[in-house]
Image (cartoon, rainbow, N blue to C red):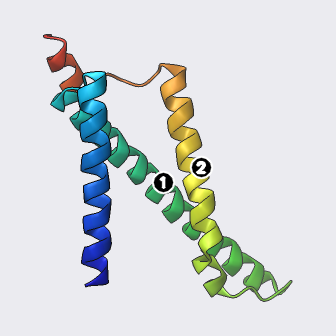
């Protein structure tokens, strides 16, 4: 029940804030749709960095173990700090990608422009 309550709070907050801003700033549904798509792209990027961080961490832990230099538990890769790093890495990558202007146009953007 708590999870549903928290989900409802998040959805209601989003509706109020985005609905109010949409009216004041003149955002269309397609603007909100593109923003939602960008959010999902960024979340996917963050999760990709997290998977890569965990994979590299597991590999390094096994390498250190195999050399006999030290014993590193594989559970250390479950630490929340790896997700925090992934969050920063994903946001930085997305920011640099958008800033560089190298990003390809998506099909939806070309259709919106009438091409």
Q: Is residue 68 above or below residue 95?
A: below
Give 86 or 20, whichever is nearer the viewer: 20
Classify 10 Å Cα crowding around label 2: few (below 14), some (14-19), many (20 and above).
some
Asked whether the beta carbons under mark 1 and mark 2 sit within 8 Å of each other, the answer is yes
Classify 10 Å Cα crowding around label 1: few (below 14), some (14-19), many (20 and above).
many
Between discs 1 and 2, the one toward the N terminus: 1
**Quadrant where the C terminus is found in the figure:** top left
The alpha-carbon separation of the residues under discs 1 and 2 comes to: 7 Å
Identity of the residue furthest to the right in this view: 69
Give 54 or 26, whichever is nearer the viewer: 26
Residue 75 placement, left or right of 21? right
Residue 81 placement, left or right of 47? right
**Quadrant where the N terminus is found in the figure:** bottom left
Q: In this view, does 29 lie above or below 7?
A: above
Which circle marks residue 89 in the picture?
2
Residue 114 placement, left or right of 67? left
Residue found at x 55% / y 68%:
55
Q: Where is residue 8 in the image (x, y as percent from the top left)?
A: 25, 66
Which type of secondary structure does the marked residue at label 2 adopt? helix
Q: Position of residue 30 (x, y in %)?
A: 18, 29
Q: Where is residue 62 in the image (x, y as percent from the top left)?
A: 67, 80
Residue found at x 63% / y 85%:
74
Which circle marks residue 46 in the picture?
1
Q: In this view, does 98 lie above or below 13?
A: above
Give 77 or 14, whichever is nearer the viewer: 14
Residue found at x 26% / y 58%:
11
Residue 34 picture quarter: top left
Q: Is residue 89 above or below residue 55?
A: above
**Residue 37 in view (yes/no):** no
């Amino acid at each position: 029940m708590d999870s549903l309550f928290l989900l409802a709070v998040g959805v209601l907050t989003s509706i109020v804030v985005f609905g109010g801003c949409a009216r004041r700033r003149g955002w269309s549904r397609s603007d909100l749709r593109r923003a939602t798509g960008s959010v999902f792209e960024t979340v996917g990027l963050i999760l990709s960095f997290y998977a890569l961080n965990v994979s590299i961490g597991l590999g390094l832990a096994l390498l250190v173990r195999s050399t006999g230099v030290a014993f590193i538990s594989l559970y250390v890769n479950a630490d929340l700090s790896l997700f925090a790093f992934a969050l920063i890495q994903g946001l930085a990558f997305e920011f640099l990608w958008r800033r560089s202007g190298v990003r390809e146009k998506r099909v939806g953007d070309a259709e919106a422009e009438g091409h």
